[in-house]
Amino acid sequence: MPNSAFAQTYRSVRLNGILSQSAMQNRHIGYAPSNDGVVQRGDVDVTRVPQSSNQEQALAHAMYAVSAPHNGAFSVALERAGHGPLDMETRQQTADEIEGALSEQQRGQLQELMEYMNMSRDQALSLVAQSNSAPELTATGRQQASQRMENTFMVTAWADTPSTQATPHETTRSGIAPSQFTSVMVPEQHAHEADAVDQILSAQGHLAGPRMQSVPSVMGIEPHFQRTNGDIHSVTGVPAPDYHTGIAHQALQGAVDVHLVKTEFPRPHDE
């Protein structure tokens, strides 16, 4: 049986399902508490994706479910407690970069500003740069984001109650038993481990629900995360597991609940 941190969490979920904190505590199952780490929950959080009438709507809803600010599934992975904030820096654009991105209308406004304030070109562009500067992920931060999203897997199940909203939204349910799983999606980086666990559990007669489905990492998802100061930032230029395609396929058949499971991995100070 594979013994990595990923495999251990995956095996536990395949055997026990998605359980509340209190249920896991009662069964003596180890778990990483939610961000507050205090409330003993009797239910689990899910993102409910309503049934879609067409493929375009299904894909849009599925993408929102994984990437939206505040309640997108990937925000759970990116904001995971114990690993610290993602590495960011505030980079100020150069005068040439700013000027090259200006429209004709903006160039005219810049010229008016220079004349009104009796400024040089560089002084005016410096003011624009200061107002436009915002924190962004460093190369290290992008690597951290990728690692955090890859060390997850996603479980889906049909909604246990009718969807009350026309768009994806956060809600709760008592839990998801293994027999209720409609899919178990695993990033390709961990597919070999997950498949090995499935094979062993199946041979032992303990595998309920579908076999795992390997998903590739793709560009263009751009999930969001919240910094400790409350600011929302997007992750761009970083591949993320393609969970949304599988969600969209199921949403064409009915309302589906999705739950992202975080798996542990070494932190820099642990290595």
Image (spheres, grey):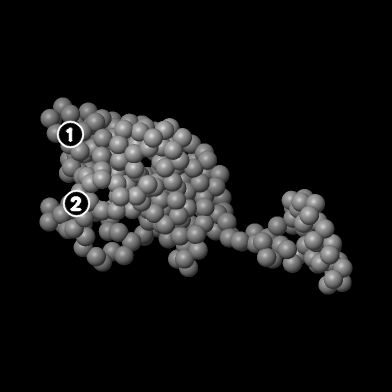
Judge from the rendering whether residue 179 lies leftward or rightward of residue 249; answer left or right.
Answer: left
- In the picture, the disc for residue 135 is none
- In the picture, the disc for residue 208 is 1
Judge from the rendering whether residue 139 lies leftward or rightward of residue 247; answer left or right.
Answer: right
The amino acid type of the residue labelled 2 equals Ser
Q: Earlier in the sequence, mark 2 or mark 1?
A: 2
Query: Does residue 143 appear in the picture of this structure?
Result: no
Give whichever of 21, 249 is nearer the camera.
249
Query: Does residue 134 appear in the picture of this structure?
Result: yes
Q: Residue at x 32, y 47 (%)?
A: 48
Q: Which residue is mark 2?
A: 174
Q: Residue at x 21, y 55 (%)?
A: 43
Mark 1 Cα shell of 10 Å, populated few (<14), some (14-19), many (≥20): some
Give whichever of 266, 226 is nearer the camera.
226
User: Considering the numbered disc 2 on the image, is that residue within a helix, a strand or a loop?
Assistant: loop
| Residue 260 coordinates in the image, percent (x, y) | 33, 46
